[in-house]
Structures are given as C-alpha cells and as structure tokens.
Amino acid sequence: MGKQYEALSERWIEFIAEQKIFFVGTATTDSRVNVSPKGMDSFRVLNNNRVIWLNVTGSGNESSAHVQRDPRMTIMFCSFEGPPLILRLYGAARVIHKNDHDWEELFAHFNPLPGARQIFDLSINLVQTSCGMATPYYAYTGDRDLLSDWARRKGDDGLKQYWEEKNQSSIDNIPTHIVENNVRS
C-alpha cells in the first residue's frame, strides 16, 4: 500500500543518492505525456522539499517545453536491488537556462557534464512511496559514455546548431526557448 508524505525524509534522501537512474514525467493539459529516463551524475537534493537535476542535450526537449507551460512534474525512483521500493516526487518545476540569474549558483552543485542545457528545479509538494514488489532485479554494470562523447565532439557551436535544429519545440510544437535562453552574448 502506498504512503504519502509532505517531504523527503533522510531515509529517502539516502535512497535517492544510491540510485543510478530516475524517470521524469511531464505534460501540459493539451500535450502528450512525456516520460524520460535520466542517468549520469545529474540529480541533487537541496533540502527535504527541493531537488534539482541537470538536463543534458538529447534528441528531444519535452520536459522543458512542458514545464514552461505547466510546471507539473513527477520524478520516480525505483529500487532494482535490495528491498523493493518505488519513490515518487510530485511538485512544481521551473526551467533554468544558462542565461538565467540563478544558473551559476545551481550549476555549481554538479560536476560539469558535456552538453548541459538546462537545470530543473522541483519544489516538492508530495512524496509517495509504494511497494515495488513486482519490479525485477537489475544489476548496474556502469554508465554509458556515448552521450557525453557525442556532446564533446559537437562542441559549443555544434550543440547550438543541434538545439536550433532539434530542440526548439516539443513533439506537440510547444516552444522550448532553448536557443535564446542558452546562448550567452
């Protein structure tokens, strides 16, 4: 049976720190629902009701488009080893781009990742746990470096061009504002 909490406990914060993958869900009232797996060293807990995650360049930019129109976001962690657990964080998110005043402060929480394009700042209003007893065991064998290698090869100019070509809008044509908010003058 699922349980609900107003904030993250120290136990849940420790659980999050051990995870290698998390899933992000966003949608607007009139868009497709997007669920995206995230990895790398890209997630930080700032306090019991606030988390941030560093978003790197990828094939789409759905979360950014959605959150700029409707701030709802759900983040899910799932135990693939040890005791079963599903942990969901519900709240209102905002997108921070490189040109935003708090980019530097929040970016300082992360080791730099090639292709970094946004930070998502989630104010948590509900934490929910559920059993996860049907979730299979999986063994973590390592990170994939493919995306980081790709971003390094692209370089800053190549990433900007990729954003212009591939990341300007969602699959439902919702603008992401990535180019104008990430290119420093």
Image (cartoon, grey):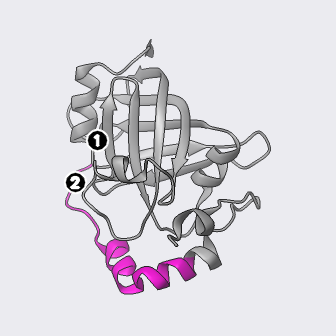
Pick the residue in front: 52 or 138: 52
Q: Position of residue 121 (x, y in %)?
A: 46, 40
> For residue 95: magenta?
no
Asked if the residue under mark 1 is in contact with the one under mark 2, i.e. CB atoms within 8 Å, the reply is yes
The answer to whether residue 133 shows anywhere in this view is no
**Callout 2: helix, strand or loop?**
loop
Q: Residue at x 36, y 37 (%)?
A: 78
Circle 2 sits on which residue? 140
Say whether residue 133 is left or right of residue 142. right
Marks 2 and 1, how far apart at CA: 9 Å
Amino acid type of disc 1? Phe
Q: Position of residue 100 (x, y in %)?
A: 51, 53
Image quarter where the N terminus lies is top left
Q: Position of residue 131 (x, y in %)?
A: 37, 23
Q: Earlier in the sequence, mark 2 or mark 1?
A: 1
Residue 113 to residue 89: above or below: below
Quarter of the figure with residue 180: bottom right
Q: Residue at x 31, y 41 (%)?
A: 44
Say whether residue 63 is left or right of residue 175. left
Quarter of the figure with residue 116: bottom left
> For residue 148: magenta?
yes
Quarter of the figure with residue 143: bottom left
Amino acid type of disc 2? Tyr
Pick the residue in front: 28 or 77: 28
The answer to whether residue 120 shows anywhere in this view is yes
**Magenta segment:** 138-162
- Main secondary structure found in the magenta portion: helix
Circle 1 sits on which residue? 80
Q: State the mark number for residue 25.
A: none
